[in-house]
Amino acid sequence: MQSEIRTKTFFDKIRYSQCWEDPKLLYEGLRITPEDDVLSISSGGCNTLALLLKNPQSVTAIDFNLSQNCLLELKVAALQNLDYADFIAFLGVRPIEHRWELYQNIRVGLSPTARGYWDTQRTMIEQGVLHVGRFENYLRMFRQTILPLVHTHRTIEQLLSLKTLEEQKCFYESIWDNRRWRFLFRVFFGKLMLGRLGRDPEFFKYVQIENVGEHYLQRAKYALTEIPIQGNFYAEHILTGAYSNLEQTHPYLIESNFQKLRENLAKLKIVTGELEKFLDEKPEGSFSKFNLSDIFEWMSQANYEALLRAIMRASRDGARLCYWNNLVLREHPSSLDDRLQSHRELAQQLHFQDRSFVYRNFVVESVHKPSAADALDTISTISVK
């Protein structure tokens, strides 16, 4: 099976230097145990590292974009070779003057390919690699050029200081949601700007939503009025570019998780290649949990279904899948109902709590592999008919 998205030429640089899918949803949706072998889309590497904290048997990170895997390797090498304070400063969570010097200390932990990549990227290293993805640069543009036209720094700080949802709703309606906010937000996060500067025009190939800017405006309203702003490090980063409380940020950046994460890095394997080909080459039952990010956004319904079948073949009975829908709704077709069970109630509950509010839907599914008895029953039924 050939990858549809591998052919897109815009996947040759770092698209995301952070993961914008809430790891809390993965934790609740996948329910990882020490017996699990997890397959995870690399992307920015954050959620792959977060999954290691649940102590699975193994985590295999895969991405066909070499740049994304070089980023994950760099984060791993930083974890292995720096203390916590230097680790978060090197990534860009806290300011520091000598990131390039720190890089010289950790480059020995990189593969030759990743070392060759990062040796030529001094500017990105010095900037802090959490901030160098195309999408992160787009959010920086919003934060530095659009948001100041709408709200002052003091107003933003007021929003981030609110303690209850009731306060947030009142603040949004009376202060935040003005005409400039609505107009500029719709334009900046509309299809034209997002396609040219934030994602890519091909991202919208299968999108049927007519007014993308309005859609994201409503998602932003939901986040600022229905999700507690306290602890929402996604909203804080979009609005300020920083994390004020490191105990309320991504799990792999929290100091109390640092040593455990280091100890579990030996369980991580990083693969660069097409997911479809990789799955076809793996034995049946290789994986029990799947973090699929939002990869189905980029492919046709037919290719989505074909990839689901490849995932099911490589999975164990009872394996769980988690993935997000951004603008394109994807959920397994009825023809796979006998092999895939949708946990819609759980997924909906988790989606309502999603701190990374950009997504339209969250999907949790589990695999049912017919037993020998099931096969005999099917044969008997066919024979009777």
Image (cartoon, grey):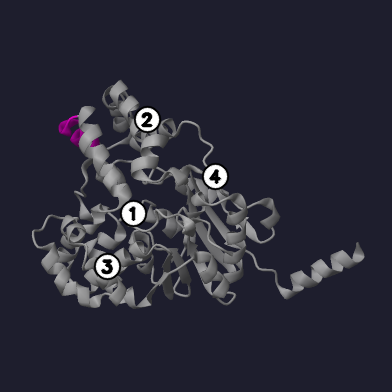
4 or 1: tag closer to the N-terminus = 1
In this rendering, position of residue 243 left or right of residue 310: left
Determine whether the residue tagged by mark 2 lies in a helix, strand or loop: helix
- Label 1: how many Cα within 10 Å (few below 14, some 14–19, many 20+): many
Q: Which residue is painted at 38% across and 56% down in the image?
A: 23
Give the residue type at disc 1: Tyr
Q: Which mark is residue 225?
A: none
Mark 3 or 4, closer to the camera: 3
Work out which quarter of the rendered image holds the N terminus and state it. Answer: bottom right
Residue under the point 31% across and 67% down:
70
What's the residue type where badge 3 is placed?
Tyr
- Tell me the number on the disc at residue 117: 3
Residue assigned mark 2: 186
The Cα–Cα distance between marks 2 and 4, rounded to whole angstroms, is 21 Å
Which residue has dot 4 on it?
329
Question: Residue at the spot x=25%, y=46% of the render?
Answer: 237
Q: Amino acid at mark 4?
A: Leu
What secondary structure is marked by label 3? helix
Is 314 left or right of 261, judged from the image as shown?
Answer: right
N-term-proximal mark, 3 vs 4: 3
Q: Residue 270, how many percent across, how many down?
A: 39, 72
Which residue, given by chain and number where applicable, does mark 1 sit on?
A: 16
Residue 338 image position (x, y, % from top left): 69, 59
Q: Which of disc 3 and disc 2 is earlier in sequence?
A: 3
Query: Mark 4 Cα within 10 Å, few/some/many (few <14, many 20+)?
Result: some
Residue 315 location, quadrant: bottom right
Judged from the image, the secondary structure of the residue bearing numbered disc 4 is loop
Q: Residue at x 32, y 65 (%)?
A: 72
Most extreme residue toward the left, as rendered? 97
Q: Position of residue 328 (x, y in %)?
A: 52, 44
Quadrant location of residue 47?
Answer: bottom left
Q: Which residues are magenta?
A: 152-160
